[in-house]
Amino acid sequence: MGALTEIHAPTARAAGAAAAFVLALGSRLLQREPQKHLPLLWLGTTEAFSEGGLPYAAGIRETFGIAPQRLLFAEAPKLGDTLWIGEEAARLPDLAGVILELRGNPRMLDLTATRRLHRRAQAAGRPVFLLRQSAEQTPTAAPVRLLVSPAPAALRQTLDGPLRGSLGPPGLELTVAKSRIARPGTFTLEWNPHERRLQLRNDPLSNQAANRPSRAYPTVPGSVVSLSVDRQDLAPAPGKVMGFPAPERRAAGG
């Protein structure tokens, strides 16, 4: 675990899914060393938190089981200060790990900067998760790069089978973009909030439910709104307007 790992959110709307994946890893990490009571440090720039939002302690505790006293939060307005804090924090023995959240492709985040983060993580034997929003894939020293996007939730499973119109565990689409030991591929994962673990969605019923076609539901007498099921999971991608037709001009004296 003592290494730098890149977690990419390809688009701005995938930032929440990428952050959830990192928190899932952090939850598993803290479960492995409960006797030490070491905290995680979540560090980021003001720009990143302005776009992706601030951590919500109550929700993190309820969903991921991370107590507020085991999650430290730090924000720096400048990228240089954020990287410096991340390098210093990566070698501290009193931290279970470091989450470094940045946005875009800043020039300062090059091979040299990521190599320093990776070496500090290796020396301390602690993981450093580089959480990147809306970033293109560029050369870094991280041995692993994962792309994370939200995935449609499957139906909730019951003893009688999938529950119609329900929502199952949160889904994530994970793509292995770079790894020395793992083969490239894309997987759909689910976070089990009860057992506090990630699980691979390989149940045929779950896959069928997640990709089910839209169908009409009968109206409910007295209802004022339609049932919020079987709808599009994401807004359609915006199109590009290449140009507008020129307005017609009237001839002089017309």
Image (cartoon, rainbow, N blue to C red):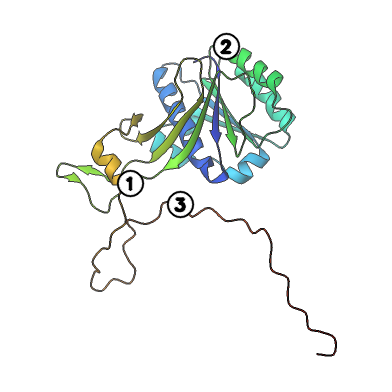
Query: Callout 1, which amino acid?
Result: Asn
Asked which quadrant contains residue 8, the reply is top right
Q: Which residue is mark 2?
A: 122
Q: In the shown orientation, is residue 135 left or right of residue 18?
A: right
Q: What residue is rendered at 38% in x and 45% in y?
A: 152
Q: Which residue is mark 1?
A: 211
How far, Cα to Cα, is label 3 from label 1? 13 Å
Labels 2 & 3 near each other (Cβ < 8 A): no
Q: Position of residue 254 (x, y in %)?
A: 80, 90
Q: What residue is rendered at 61% in x and 30% in y?
A: 137
Asked which quadrant contains residue 33, the reply is top left
**What mark, if any, has residue 234 been given in the picture?**
3
Up/down of 137 relative to 154, above or below: above
How far, Cα to Cα, is label 1 from label 2? 41 Å
Q: In the shown orientation, is residue 195 left or right of residue 26?
A: left
Query: Callout 2, which amino acid?
Result: Gln
